[in-house]
Image (spheres, rainbow, N blue to C red):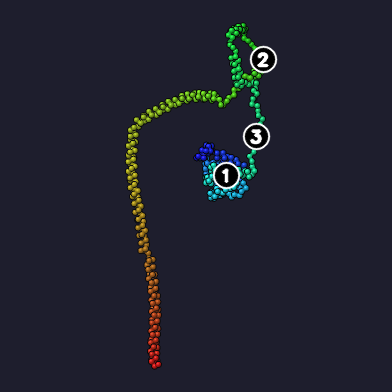
Amino acid sequence: MAEEDERGPGAVYQMFVVMEDLLDKLKVLDYEQHVLEKHNIKPLSRHYFVSSPHVLSNPGEQFYLFSVIAAWLISQCGRPFDTPQEYDDPNATVSNILSELRALGGQVDFPPAKLKSGCGEHVCYVLDQLVEKALKSKGFAWNRPQYPSVEVEDECVQEDDAELTLSKVEEEMTQEDEDYEDEEGLDLDALKTRTNQSVELSGSRPAEVLESDVDATEWNLEVERVLPQLKVTIRTDNKDWRIHLDQMHQHQDGINTSLQEAKGCLFKLKEDITKTLEKVGSREKYVNTQLEHLISEFRQAQAQLNKVKELYKQASGGVTERTRILAEISEELEKVKQEMEEKGSSMSDGAPVVKIRQSLTKLKQEIEQMDVRMGVVEHTLLQAKLREKNNMTRDMHATHLLEPNSQNY
């Protein structure tokens, strides 16, 4: 805040001027074709990068356009610089742009975070510095404007002899007044004598009507020739307060006259509306008095209807509850009927008996097979026991025969 106060109150609006100049410089470099058409971007407004509550802002879009335009300007300065993408790291993008600006000789005395918003004084400053470097590298120079040669007309326009301006008339009148004031005094005697002579001349005139002997055509021609000299041209000045005052008086008079007419019409309309309302009120009172007994009967009928509606609601509520109970009972009845049908069909059906018989037959066959298998196993076991017994008896005889021979030795 202290820095803004030192710079002055107009420093807040300096960015508007810088942005307008920046847009003109970008148009000189033909940024519409090289940037807008290439990236499918709408043309920038003259206050696009300005940070103000009166200007709509979109930080993401503004930062992306700032980075794209800055990269294009850096490339115009002859330094290779990749075009940033929409999802790149903004910190890295800002640091790269500022480093390139420092390399081109620009001064950066503010933190890089000031550029992340995509708008504001610092964004306009960076772009302005870059576009200046690009114009300088292209060899562009601003020339002085060349104004077309226009012959300057004389300010003093010769007035037409056929017209008299109001200013000229006023000058003549003031000059006559001054000449008249320069005289030492009025000669009353001479004035009286001149008056008497005029009276005598008027008395000496003939009594008959004077007739002119001038031709009418020549008279009309003389009138047409002299008519332009009799014209007085009044040059109106729109800044003159007298003209505005006269117009205000005229408008006030018109408003007063219109107001008087409108007042008469409005008063008449008011009287008509009042009379109509009185008639409607009296008619309403008459209708109320005539239909009072019908209204009382209607009210009684309405109260009775409300009672009947209340009873109907209560009855309909009981019917609804009973309907619900009936539906539950019907559902249980359907289940019981289904179970009875299943049991009856199972009782009358002989299929289970057939199945039982087949199962018994199969069981007998399996028992017979088991008996055969058991007999085979018993026979095999008996043979094994007999074989074992024979082996035991053979071993016993062999031991007896060996014992006497060992004693002999």
Residue under the image location 34 percent in, 32 percent down = 292
Return the mark for residue 147: 3
Mark 2 and mark 3 in contact (Cβ < 8 Å)?
A: no
Task: Classify residue 268 by image quadrant.
Answer: top left
Tag 3's secondary structure? loop
Q: Is residue 372 visible?
A: no
Residue 333 in percent (x, y) is at: 35, 56
Measured from the top left, where is residue 360 in percent x and y? 37, 71
- Which tag, 1 or 2, sits closer to the chain's start? 1
Residue type pointed to by label 2: Asp
User: Label 2 belongs to which residue?
Assistant: 215
Q: Nearer the viewer, mark 1 or mark 3?
A: 1
CA gap, disc 1 and disc 3: 36 Å
User: Is label 1 or label 2 in front?
Assistant: 1
Q: Secondary structure at mark 1?
A: loop
Q: Residue 161: x and y, percent?
A: 65, 21
Quadrant where the C terminus sits is bottom left
Q: Which residue is mark 1?
A: 107
Q: Secondary structure at mark 2?
A: loop
Q: Return the disc, 1 or 3, that comes first in the chain's sequence.
A: 1
Q: Amino acid at mark 1?
A: Gln
Q: In this picture, is 373 found above or below 162?
A: below
